[in-house]
Image (cartoon, rainbow, N blue to C red):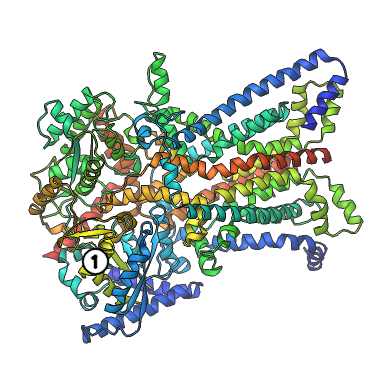
């Protein structure tokens, strides 16, 4: 780009650039400058040297992760869980948003919306405690019900197989109200004339939803999925830790990068090692989002993140 | 809602009732059934929380959480409100932070989002990437902490509860995608009339973006309301402690002390109703939002309708 | 030793270089402060030796302490009193910052990383002591400094305690000075034992008989309760049945390596690879198959003591101090059943608690080093100040009962709950309500304390931290389920565990540990 072109562009857009300034400053201060801390992933941190003065130690900080024999397992688990969350959560949230929009009762709609928001407010600690009350072998609610009907009790906390289902359901449950608000807002923004036109064309209500509502939701869906994909290598620590805790029997099915790193580093408290783990997640997430964003750009430029 | 109502009217006017009414009825039934089931699943655990918060600690230990308290007790609440002024102060801090943070944050979020979605702005992708990149890479806790305490000197001030959370890339991008549905023609014609970009944003775009503002505003407000981590890191002054942190501290102090006592061999006597307390805290922290929600929701729904009509 | 010295030299060079680099890297503040502080301390130390006893306290200073725990409600009152005394004695005032139990382990390292302004910090082997010492967060304390500024402590503290507090041969902490035995005991329901006509519980066998009897006959009661979900890497009975029972000493609870107490050569071995462990997991499996503990014990989220108090659990294992405190609580609240403390290994060797379980350290960048040390001296060994800071104001927070006992005062609850244990000392008073049986067990133990050459040995795992981290994971994932009887085939489970440990690098850790121990023993001769 030639110089005058650049400055010409600046001049032309000076109002817009000015409007961006607060946000740019914000992210410079609170994100980009502290980002220099990434170097800690390659350093043996000590207080005397601080962030920049501590000695380099190459890739040593990454060793604990890759030599653990668990790197592949926890990475795979993290990604699979996140894919499941993205699919299940979004499908449910979209369904709920559409149904809420179509249902006639005003009060019903309001109350249902409020009630579905409730799980968002229950902290993971409390969710974990409730889950233990439901699932534990000896006096858990589920086993009480099973035995009342003369069935065999099930040992959920010692059986890894149940956990992917449980975790996906719990994640969906907790985010249902919060997530559907976004889709509800998108649905209400759809031009009503489009519906009326479809009606006149003789489409039934299901066709109308399929042909008009859902296509109009696509941009929102793409954006939300893309945003989630950027974090596909990060596990929701609060959820996994409070639901599973340190139950080693379940790790094969439930251990994600974040819980693994937390457990491994809790006693050594090594800043460099945790920075290394974070860097690993960042790099993978970055690569994935570049690919995903590229794919979306090919499909439609306006829907891409950048 | 007007949209649905009008389409129903249209449908009944356009004749050919039988089949069409059938599919509407079917959808209504489906809607009521599915929503009711999901709502019940969301409600029962909350009921469990409410009931347990009013249960005697002993009965929770003996029988677990119950939907109806077997022995009623308000011990957890009286413990929480042992120092009522502290609690009121904490509510005050949270409300102030939430209100200021939401208004400021929403304004900046929408202004940024507006610029990013302007198709005639050449560098919109570069800037989007500039913002988005921060969600992928982070320098970790220590440098961020140093930045805020050493260089910005915001430690132990109300500012530290507001500023670091002012903008969130997620909200900016969602806002941007919502604004994409506002016809470009509006900006173009205003420009021809000689309006500046900032004026277009304030006078034309903001009113049209009400559904998006309501949604994102709600999210920002919830984020401020629920935040305790910034307070944990930066606040020592008891008069500046927000509600969630105040509660977190109460609970954490009990658990933390038990663990420390075991490790250090030290001995301190205390018996506290941890389980019922956890539950009571959930209610104390959520209560005001739940009470306020119908009011918020009204604006929320209103905003949506205006948007729908305009759109 | 030679290699160690040159390593230390290399380390100091690196540190010096990095200090220099830091000055260029925008972190000048910290670096400068560090420089000046180390200069002043060497000056002070030098002055001290030439001018012993006559420390210059003409300028009033304010000493900032970093303590762990919730700020006590009556802090202002008690520390107000304290300041009057401290002002008179060393012309200083004290201000404490409290890091709540809820978040201290997140905040504590940050305070150091940001090099915030404080002079004294609570520390302990479980509270970042080694970590911060190695990272340069604490000031090294020399014998001269101790002799000059804390003469009373220097006199009262056993040499062993100083030795245990050293990291790589350097001292960074004034440990507490309290005789403690860390052996664990179990709490049992004495009424149930009598009900089923069982022998007194004094050994692993009689304890197993008790647990099985309760499990078989008492519906709705868990015979044994534990909360492994907390992240403890051992079965909660291991300390009793593996360590105490066999007279072993685990070097570090994060790794399964131990030596025999009476082995003068200090040969370390993997405890999971011993016949003793094989028979112990058979013992555990038998208990587990008899439903002595819940099948979901590994996920237990309930507080074990609360469960016992509620009559839902009939036994747990804990150190004597905690068991005694719980017993006191039970008696105070009048539970409807009889509880008793049982020592399952009464005839085995007892070892005293390592001194670093509690202590105070000086911040590396403190500007008031002398006065801080003098303050610690007063906290630990000045009767009036010790009583005040440990128990609060007489008549309000506690009542003195003679010279070495106390009873809770009317507002005892307003001055408790934080880490004033950091300056525990021989001046500590015992609570009059402390159960007599716990006291007698303790007295018997103290008489049997066994001293051994490796008593002051502390493992420096900085060279094998990756392996140690991974071993911890293996223990949680393979050892815990095996020990709680959740693995059907014991032999295979044990083999799996050891195979996993091997690939996590246990041999490397063992070699490193052994060489450190050998060097340590050689240096002692």
Q: Can see residue C17?
A: yes
Reading the image, the residue beneath label 1 is C386
Give the quarter of the image for residue C118: bottom left
Left or right: residue C102 versus residue B234 is: left
Which residue is drawn at the image coordinates 81% and 24% (left, top)?
B8
Q: Chain of mark 1?
A: C
Q: Provide residue C20's location: percent of width, then percent of height.
A: 44, 76
Q: Provide residue B288's location: percent of width, then percent of height.
A: 58, 44
Q: Provide residue B233's location: percent of width, then percent of height.
A: 48, 58
Looking at the picture, tell me which residue is in the foreground, B310 or C282: B310
Around disc 1, counting alpha carbons within 10 Å, would you say few (fewer than 14), some (14 to 19), or many (20 or more)?
many
Give the structural element (helix, strand or loop) at label 1. helix
Q: Can see residue A286?
A: no
- Quarter in which the N terminus of chain C is drawn: bottom left
Residue extending furthest right? B193
Which residue is drawn at the image coordinates 28% and 40% (left, top)?
C305
In this rendering, the count of numbered labels is 1
Q: Provide residue A298's location: percent of width, then percent of height.
A: 72, 42
Left or right: residue B213 versus residue B14 is: left
């Amino acid at each position: 780009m030639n110089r005058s072109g650049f400055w010409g562009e600046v001049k032309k857009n000076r109002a817009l650039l000015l409007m961006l300034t607060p946000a740019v400053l914000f992210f410079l201060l609170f994100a980009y400058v502290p980002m220099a801390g990434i170097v800690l992933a390659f350093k043996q941190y000590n207080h005397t040297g601080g962030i920049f003065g501590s000695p380099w130690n190459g890739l040593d900080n990454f060793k604990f992760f890759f030599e653990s024999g668990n790197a592949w397992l926890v990475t795979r688990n993290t990604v699979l869980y996140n894919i499941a969350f993205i699919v299940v959560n979004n499908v449910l949230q979209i369904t709920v948003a559409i149904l809420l929009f179509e249902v006639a009762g005003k009060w019903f709609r309001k109350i249902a919306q409020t009630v579905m928001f409730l799980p968002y407010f229950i902290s993971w600690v409390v969710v974990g405690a409730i889950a233990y009350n439901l699932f534990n072998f000896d006096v858990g609610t589920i086993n009480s019900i099973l035995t009342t009907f003369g069935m065999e009790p099930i040992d959920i906390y010692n059986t890894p197989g149940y956990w992917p289902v449980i975790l996906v359901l719990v994640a969906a449950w907790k985010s249902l109200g919060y997530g559907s608000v976004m889709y509800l807002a998108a649905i209400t923004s759809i031009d009503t004339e489009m519906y009326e036109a479809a009606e006149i064309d003789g489409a039934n209500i299901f066709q109308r939803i399929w042909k008009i509502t859902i296509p109009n939701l696509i941009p929102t869906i793409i954006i939300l999925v893309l945003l989630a994909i950027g974090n596909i290598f990060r596990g929701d620590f609060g959820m996994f830790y409070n639901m599973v805790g340190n139950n080693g029997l379940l790790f094969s099915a439930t251990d994600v990068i974040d819980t693994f790193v937390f457990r491994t580093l809790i006693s050594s408290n090594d800043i460099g090692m945790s920075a290394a783990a974070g860097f690993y997640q960042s790099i993978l997430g970055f690569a994935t989002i570049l690919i995903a964003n590229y794919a979306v750009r090919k499909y439609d430029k306006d829907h891409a993140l950048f | 809602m007007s949209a649905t109502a009008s389409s129903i009217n249209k449908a009944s006017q356009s004749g050919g009732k039988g089949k069409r009414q059938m599919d509407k009825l079917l959808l209504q039934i489906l809607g009521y059934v599915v929503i009711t089931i999901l709502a019940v699943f969301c409600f029962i655990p909350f009921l469990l929380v409410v009931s347990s918060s009013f249960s005697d600690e002993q009965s929770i230990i003996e029988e677990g959480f119950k939907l109806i308290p077997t022995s009623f007790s308000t011990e957890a609440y009286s413990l929480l409100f042992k120092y009522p002024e502290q609690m009121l102060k904490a509510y005050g801090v949270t409300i102030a932070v939430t209100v200021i943070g939401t208004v400021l944050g929403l304004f900046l979020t929408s202004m940024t989002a507006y610029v990013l979605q302007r198709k005639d702005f050449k560098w919109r992708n570069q800037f989007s990437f500039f913002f988005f990149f921060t969600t992928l890479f982070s320098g970790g806790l220590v440098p961020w902490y140093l930045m805020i305490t050493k260089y910005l000197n915001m430690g132990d001030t109300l500012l530290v509860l507001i500023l670091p959370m002012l903008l969130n890339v997620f909200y900016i991008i969602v806002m941007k995608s919502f604004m994409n549905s506002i016809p470009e023609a509006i900006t173009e014609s205003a420009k021809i009339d000689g309006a500046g970009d900032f004026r277009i944003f304030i006078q034309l775009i903001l009113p049209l973006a009400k559904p998006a503002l309501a949604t994102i505003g709600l999210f920002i407000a919830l984020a401020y309301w629920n935040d305790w981590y910034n307070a944990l890191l930066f606040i020592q002054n008891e008069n500046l402690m927000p509600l969630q942190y105040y509660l977190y501290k109460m609970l954490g102090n009990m658990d933390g002390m038990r663990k420390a006592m075991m490790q250090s061999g030290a001995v301190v006597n205390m018996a506290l109703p941890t389980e019922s307390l956890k539950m009571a805290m959930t209610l104390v922290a959520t209560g005001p939002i739940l009470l306020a929600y119908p009011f918020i929701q009204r604006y929320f729904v209103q905003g949506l309708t205006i948007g729908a009509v305009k759109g | 030793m030679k290699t160690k010295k040159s390593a230390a030299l290399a380390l100091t060079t690196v540190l010096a270089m990095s200090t220099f680099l830091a000055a260029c890297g925008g972190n000048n503040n910290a670096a400068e402060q560090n420089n000046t502080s180390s200069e002043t301390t060497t000056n002070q130390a030098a002055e001290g030796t030439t001018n012993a006893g006559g420390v210059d306290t003409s300028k009033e200073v304010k000493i900032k302490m970093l303590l762990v725990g919730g700020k006590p409600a009556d802090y202002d009152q008690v520390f107000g009193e304290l300041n009057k005394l401290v002002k008179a004695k060393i012309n200083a005032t004290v201000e404490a910052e409290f890091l709540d139990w809820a978040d201290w382990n997140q905040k504590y390292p940050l305070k150091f990383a940001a090099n915030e302004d404080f002079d004294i910090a609570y520390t302990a082997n479980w509270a970042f002591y080694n970590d911060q010492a190695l990272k340069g967060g604490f000031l090294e304390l020399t014998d001269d400094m101790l002799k000059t500024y804390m003469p009373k402590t220097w006199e009262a503290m056993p040499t062993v305690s100083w030795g245990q507090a050293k990291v790589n041969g350097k001292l960074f902490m004034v440990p507490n000075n309290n005789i403690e035995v860390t052996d664990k005991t179990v709490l049992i329901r004495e009424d149930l034992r009598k009900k089923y006509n069982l022998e007194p519980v004094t050994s692993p066998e009689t304890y197993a008989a008790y647990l099985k009897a309760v499990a078989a006959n008492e519906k709705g009661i868990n015979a044994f309760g534990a909360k492994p979900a907390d992240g403890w890497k051992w079965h909660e009975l291991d300390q009793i049945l593996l360590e105490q029972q066999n007279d072993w000493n685990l070097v570090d609870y994060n790794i399964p390596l131990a030596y025999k107490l009476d082995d003068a050569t200090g040969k370390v071995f993997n405890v999971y690879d011993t016949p003793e462990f094989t028979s112990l997991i058979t013992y555990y499996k038998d208990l587990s198959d008899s439903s002595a503990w819940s099948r979901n014990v590994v996920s237990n989220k309930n507080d074990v003591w609360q469960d016992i108090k509620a009559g839902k659990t009939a036994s747990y294992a804990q150190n004597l101090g905690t068991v005694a405190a719980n017993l006191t609580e039970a008696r105070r609240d009048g539970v409807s059943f009889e509880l008793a403390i049982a020592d399952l290994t009464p005839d085995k060797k007892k070892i005293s608690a390592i001194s670093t379980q509690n202590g105070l350290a000086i911040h590396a960048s403190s500007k008031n080093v002398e006065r801080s040390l003098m303050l610690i001296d007063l906290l630990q060994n000045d009767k009036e100040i010790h009583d005040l800071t440990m128990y609060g104001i007489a008549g309000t927070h506690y009542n003195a009962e003679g010279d070495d006992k106390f009873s809770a005062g009317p507002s005892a609850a307003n001055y408790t709950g934080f880490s004033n244990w950091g300056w525990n000392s021989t001046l500590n008073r015992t609570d009059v309500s402390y159960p007599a049986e716990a006291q007698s067990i303790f007295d018997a133990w103290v008489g049997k304390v066994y001293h051994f050459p490796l008593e002051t040995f502390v493992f420096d795992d900085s060279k094998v931290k990756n392996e140690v981290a991974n071993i911890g994971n293996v223990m949680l994932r393979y050892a815990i389920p095996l020990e709680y009887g959740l693995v059907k085939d014991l032999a295979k489970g044990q083999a799996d565990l050891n195979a996993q440990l091997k690939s996590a690098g246990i041999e490397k850790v063992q070699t490193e540990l052994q060489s450190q121990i050998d060097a340590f023993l050689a240096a002692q001769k």
